[in-house]
Amino acid sequence: MAETPERVYQFNHSHLLGLSDYSAEDILYVLEQAKTFREVLERPVPKIPTLRDKTIVNLFYENSTRTRLSFELAQRRMGADVVNFSASTSSTRKGETLRDTIQNISSMKIDMVVVRHEGPGVPHFLTKCVDASIINAGDGAHEHPTQALLDLFTIQQIHPDLRGRKIAIIGDISYSRVVRSNILGLKKVGAEVTVCGPKTLMPAFVESMGANVSWNLDETLAWCDVAMALRIQMERMGQVTDLFPSLREYHHLFGIKMAHLEKYPDFIIMHPGPINRGVEMESRVADSERAVILNQVTNGLAIRMAVLYLLSGRVRE
Ligand code: NCD
C-alpha cells in the first residue's frame, strides 16, 4: 500500500474532465499524492493492490503512445482489471454511436473510463451516459488535464514553489489542448505564463486566460525558468495550409537551438511529445542535460496513479 498522506484533504471530485473544474488546492493535492506514487515506482517491485477490485476501460478514439501506455501501466501497477478499446478495431467502424458503445461497455460493470477523443466535450458527455468515473485523456483541442498535472509535477521537482515561476509555452497555441490545461493549472497555482508562437497560431483567448503573449523567442527564453515546446498539430488544421510558410521557417523563428542554451544558462526544456526533431527544437537540445522530457514521461505514470487512486470508487460505491 502507498503510505497514507499526512495532510487530510477533502477531495470531492468523481471525474477529471479538465483543470477548469479543479481548484489550486485540488491540483496541489494531486501533486502531493503523486510524490508517494513516484516513490512506489522506485521500489524493486513497483506494484500496489489499491485498484485490485476495479475494472477500467481505456477508450481511445485518437492515436496515442505515451498517454495510453502510461494510463495502462499505472492501472496494472495498481492491480486493476484493464480492458482496452481502440476505435480503429471496434464496431465504431460498423456505425455504432459513441453513446451505444459506452453503454454496452458499461453493462460489463466498469468502474472507470479513460477517454481520448477528437471531439471537445466528449468526456463531459460520457458522464451523462454511464455511472463510472470519467478521466479525460485529451478531447480535441480542448483539455488534456493529466498532461498538465505531470508538467506541473515535473516543474515542482526542480522549483518546489510554483508561485511566481515563469513558464514559457512555445509553438502551436491554437490547436493545442496541452496549452489550455497548462495555462489553467499554472495560473491557478500562481505561476506566470507567456505563450510564444506565430501570430497565425495564436488565439485571442489566451490573454483572457491570464497568459502574456510574445512573438519573440529570444526575449521569451531570456525571461523564463521553463521553456515548454509544443508540436505543430497539423492533423487539427484540416484544410488550412497557410498558417505558416514552412516548417523550416518555423524552426528558424521559434525552434530552440543550442545557441539559446549557451546564451541563457538557466531555463529547463520540456515537451509533451511526440517531438518533431529539427522543428520545435534542434535534436541536440532534446538530448541535452537541460531537457527533462523523459522525466516528464516517468512522472506521467505517478500522476496517473494518483488520479486513479483519488477517483477510484467515487461513483459506483
Ligand atoms: C499531446 C496530445 O496528444 O495532446 N501529446 C501527449 O499527450 N503526450 C501533444 C501532441 O500530440 O503534440
Image (spheres, rainbow, N blue to C red):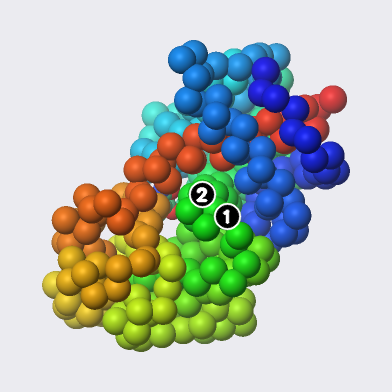
Rate crowding at label 1 as few (under 14), some (14 to 19) or many (20 or more) other CA atoms within 10 Å. Answer: few
- In percent of width and height, residue 277 lies at 19, 56
Query: Quick check: 217 above or below 82?
Result: below
Q: Tell me the quarter of the image containing the N terminus.
A: top right
How many angstroms separate mark 2 from mark 1 (CA)? Answer: 6 Å
- The residue singled out by tag 2 in the image is 157
Residue closer to the observer: 90 or 181: 181
Q: Residue at x 66, y 38 (%)?
A: 33
The answer to whether mark 2 and mark 1 are in CB contact below 8 A is yes
Relative side of 149 to 291, left or right: right
Relative side of 26 to 152, left or right: right
Q: Residue furthest left?
A: 248
Q: Residue at x 65, y 57 (%)?
A: 19
Q: Residue at x 68, y 30 (%)?
A: 309
Please, what secondary structure does the residue beneath circle 1 have? loop
Q: Residue at x 75, y 58 (%)?
A: 23
Amino acid carrying label 1: it is Pro
- The residue singled out by tag 1 in the image is 160
- In percent of width and height, residue 258 lies at 18, 66
